[in-house]
Every structure is written in structure tokens, then in C-alpha cells.
Image (cartoon, helix red, strand yellow):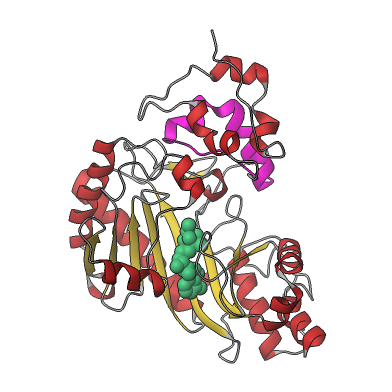
Amino acid sequence: MSDPFPEIKSTHSLVAKYVTKPIWDKLSRAVTKTSGFTLAQAIACATEFDNQHCGIYAGDWDSYKVFADVFDPLIQEYHGIAADAVHTSDMDVSKIQGNIDPAAPVHSCRIRVGRSIDGFGLSPGITKDQRVGVENLMKKAFANLTGDLAGTYFPLTGMDEKVRQQLVDDHFMFVSGDPNLKVAGMERDWPEGRGIFHNKEKTFLTWVNEEDQLRIISMQMGGDVRAVFDRLARGIKAVEDSVKAESGKDFMLDAKYGYVHSCPTNLGTGMRASVHVDLPGWTKEGLKPLQERCEELQLQPRGTRGESGGQTGVTYDISNKHRLGYSESQDGRAQEHSFRHQALVWRVGWHWSNATCTAPGPGEDQNAGCEVLRGDQNKHA
Ligand code: ADP
Ligand code: MG
């Protein structure tokens, strides 16, 4: 027996392509063990909205296994990986050799990863008890952090509204209200169980129970991405060790899909490394041409107020697009398709340090990327 086949409003989504009638008939009544998640819940965004590219989320690690008939081909297509691909993580900061020229119009750098703790559901499916369990565990785990990583956890429940708004305005804090997150079930019981940890300088932060159980973040003003990456690598390790010491639990790490996230687009490194950079020429040109150019460079533009927050002035958030099939620190010069942040750093940096962009190493497109800025200057000076 199966449920009636749903109307998938996002007709061009990957869900529309891979949730076929036979697969629906096979899986519509399947329920995951950890959080009791169903395929209908997983594809809620694709059935509710007409604008989804992927349109699917996982409610727990089991979802990727129970609904593998949908997830596997969808993930392979989205990330461009083979069915037998495996993922390798590598947070070795010594491999990050580039840095942004101080003269580049970069306001700030931020690198975040998502992490999930084994045994608890993922945000779309996580039960109320599990969510509170994650928060309670993290309160203990954060208390063990030392040195520049030490800080304080602030639960969203009971947070002073002015304090909350300031954290949002300063780009440190998530907000509620994203329609995708809502429909996907990630705002159930809001704000309970959510919160933010940060050190005194607000250069090392962790979001608790937003789109992922954990979003571990390193950020600072200016363009020293090497320092940002270094702090992130140490921070992830410290949080992981502390979670293990407090609970005996590990981060969910899948041989095929790397670090497990609620959104399949984040699988792999779960890393989004961004700069806030001024692109006045592209602002005149419009978002669409910028999006197209970024697509060619395997980068992604967003507004400065975050994915769902919108654009301000001439400043954009430019970040890597790839996460699965590329390690975090992979040497961008050695391979054509590699660690995009490093490439991004060079790309932003090249323009300012080297007008003719002659710096890229073997395998890198000699001109790619410079144009994000160079085109800006040439076309719009
Ligand atoms: P995420 O991928 O972490 O969910 P969002 O697009 O939701 O990212 O943005 C989260 C917050 O991080 C927003 O407030 C955004 O302005 C901020 N942010 C992203 N990149 C940078 C950056 N390079 N410098 C400063 N703030 C940033
Ligand atoms: Mg987000």
C-alpha cells in the first residue's frame, strides 16, 4: 500500500526528477527509526513551493539510507559525483597558501561548517527531546573550550530583543522566518533549544539547532582567511573532542557523503567560505549576470544579510559552491576543480595584487575569477 502521489509544484526540481511514481509507491509509507521521518516530510518544500532547485531535506541520518532511491541519484547529480565516490576531509591549514591582498575591497571573511551529533535527528525531523538533548550536551561541551575558543552560550529563549537584533545586524546570528526552513519543519517549537555560542571577540561562534544541529563558524574583519581557517580547524576539533568527552558521541561522518547535514547541498565538507566584498560594477550590471559569472567560477553570490536576508549597497557575499568531492584544504593550484575558497581567495586577491592575473598555478584557469572583479573595473570604471 502507498499514499496518493503528491503534486510536486517545483516541476523543475531534482525532487520532481527523482521522486517518480514507482519510487513513491515503494517509499511513501517508510518511516525512519531515529526521528520517525517520512518521504512526504522530506520533500515538503518541493510540494509546497514552485521555486526549488533541490527541494529535499533529511530528517535524520537514516533518511539518507531509507530514502536512498531518491537521495543517491539526486546527490550525485547535484554534486557531480560518481555513484561509488568517497569523501575525504582535510582541515590541514598548512595547505592554505593563498591569502587576500590587504588592498582588496574585502570587508570580512567567514567560514562555517555544519556538524551533526550521532544519535540525534537532524533539524527537519529532530524530536523536541532530541533538540533539547543537543542543546544540553552543547552547554556542557562549550564549557570545556579554552584559550581564544573559550566563550559563552546564549540561549535564544529569553534573549533580550535588543541583544538579539544587534547580533543579527552584526552578521553573527541566524534569524527565524525563512520559508524553506519553516516548511521543512525546522522551526518547530521555536525558539526552544536554539542558541548561539561565541568567544569574547565574536571570532569563533557556534549556532545550535538552526538548519543543522551545529554550525561552527570562524569569522573576522579584513581578509586574513588563513587565520580564519586556522581558528575554524582548531575550533571544530575542540568542539568534536569536547562532545566526545561529554557524551561518547561522534559527529555523523558518512564514508560516501562526508559530514551529514539536513540539506543534501551541504553534504561533504559542509563548508561555506565567504567574503563580503564590494562589487559596484556588478551591482549596476544586476544580480543575474553576477550569478551567471559566479556559476562559471563555481562560486555563489548572496546578499550581505544572509541567504534569506537580501542585498545591501554594493557589497556581496561570495562563497564556494562545491562541498562534496573536494576536501577543505585541497590545494587549489594543483587541481582544476578544487578547494574553491582558496581559489576564491586568489581570485579576489589576484586582481588587486596582479593586474594581469599571471599568478595562478598549474591546472587553474589563468583568467578565471579575476573577472569577478576585473570585469567590474573594465566594464564599469
Ligand atoms: P550560512 O550559510 O552560514 O547559513 P547565511 O547566508 O544564512 O549563511 O548567512 C548567515 C550570516 O552570516 C548572515 O548574517 C551573513 O551576513 C553572515 N555572513 C556570511 N558571510 C559573511 C562574511 N564574509 N562576513 C561577515 N558576515 C558574513
Ligand atoms: Mg543559512
Q: How far across and down, in percent of the image, does residue 6 sit?
A: 60, 24
Lateral position of residue 91 relative to residue 244, left or right: right
Quadrant for the C terminus in the image: bottom right
Residue at the right extreme, as displayed:
379
Lateral position of residue 66 relative to residue 353, left or right: left
Q: Residue at x 69, y 61 (%)?
A: 298
Q: Is residue 146 above or below residue 61?
A: below
Q: Is residue 106 above or below residue 165?
A: below
Please say whether residue 111 is visible from this viewpoint.
no
Q: Tell whether position 92 is magenta.
A: no
Q: Is residue 152 above or below residue 6?
A: below
Q: Residue at x 42, y 73 (%)?
A: 219
Dominant SS in magenta:
helix
Lateral position of residue 80 relative to residue 69, left or right: right
Q: Residue at x 76, y 75 (%)?
A: 285
Quarter of image, res 342: bottom right
Quadrant for the N terminus in the image: top right
Q: How far across and down, in percent of the image, does residue 213 sit?
A: 36, 48
* Figure disc tally: 0
Residue range in magenta is 53-81
